[in-house]
Amino acid sequence: MRKSELLVVFYLLQDNANVRKNIRQIAADLSLSIGSVFNALKKLQDNGFLIETDGLHLLRKRSILIDRWAKAYPAFREKNLIARFSFLNRQIRQLWADIRLSTTLSWGGEPAAALLDGYIQPQRWDIYTANNANALISTARMIPSAQGEIYVYKRFWQAEGTPMLVIYADLLATGDDRCREAAERIKPLI
């Protein structure tokens, strides 16, 4: 899946109202060209995920589309990696859930899933940022580390918090069975 396709599918899966928007509206909302949006929608139609009925678009086979998006997402995510960090010490690592991130930062993957239902204990921490990662040094008591267990990615959506679809994809990307189980618990929330 190309970047524009990934963004269009993400946009459509986030809100059913987005499916009813025209190409120009979608392109403007995503800051993509009309041609890119047209091609992504056409591909979805050709593959049976998007149908047009009485002038309205409808999304079909949502669960399959979610899984395809989640499978394509890790390559896109890696291109948006901006820094790696480690916790300042072991105690802070153990109490990671008490760290209050600013509104421009949000947990992804394992920590986000842990905060949702406590099912999983994180071994890798994904964080998404709307700005840069420097705030983590002072507010979250983390230090830059090329081998750190905290991965900081540039956020590609507008709203605060991390969308369930991204958390789901983060969990699946680990390839870990415990993360796969946590992802399946989250999937109905997408």
Image (cartoon, rainbow, N blue to C red):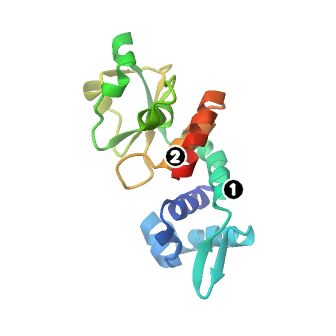
Residue 168 visible here: yes
Numbered mark located on residue 64 in the image:
1
On screen, residue 16 above or below 135: below
| Residue 166: mark | 2
The tag on residue 116 is none
Q: Residue at x 50, y 36 (%)?
A: 109
Q: Which residue of the protein is positioned furthest toward the right in this rendering?
A: 47
- In the image, what residue occupies the spot 34% across and 17% down? 92
* x then y, percent, for residue 97: 36, 27
Q: Position of residue 73 (x, y in %)?
A: 60, 47
Task: Classify residue 81 as left or right of residue 6.
Answer: left
Measure the alpha-carbon separation of dots 2 and 1. Answer: 15 Å
Which marked residue is nearer to the observer: mark 2 or mark 1? 1
Q: Amino acid at mark 1?
A: Ile
The residue sitting at 66% across, 67% down in the picture is 60
Mark 2 Cα-neighbour bin, 10 Å: few <14, some 14–19, many ≥20: many
Residue, x 46% and y 32% (percent of image)? 114
Most foreground residue, 34 or 124: 124
Q: Toward which corner of the image does residue 62 lie, by quadrant?
A: bottom right
Q: Amino acid at mark 2?
A: Val
Provide the secondary structure element on which disc 2 rests: helix
- Judging from the image, what secondary structure is the residue with disc 1 in? helix
Coordinates of residue 56 in the picture (x, y in percent): 57, 82
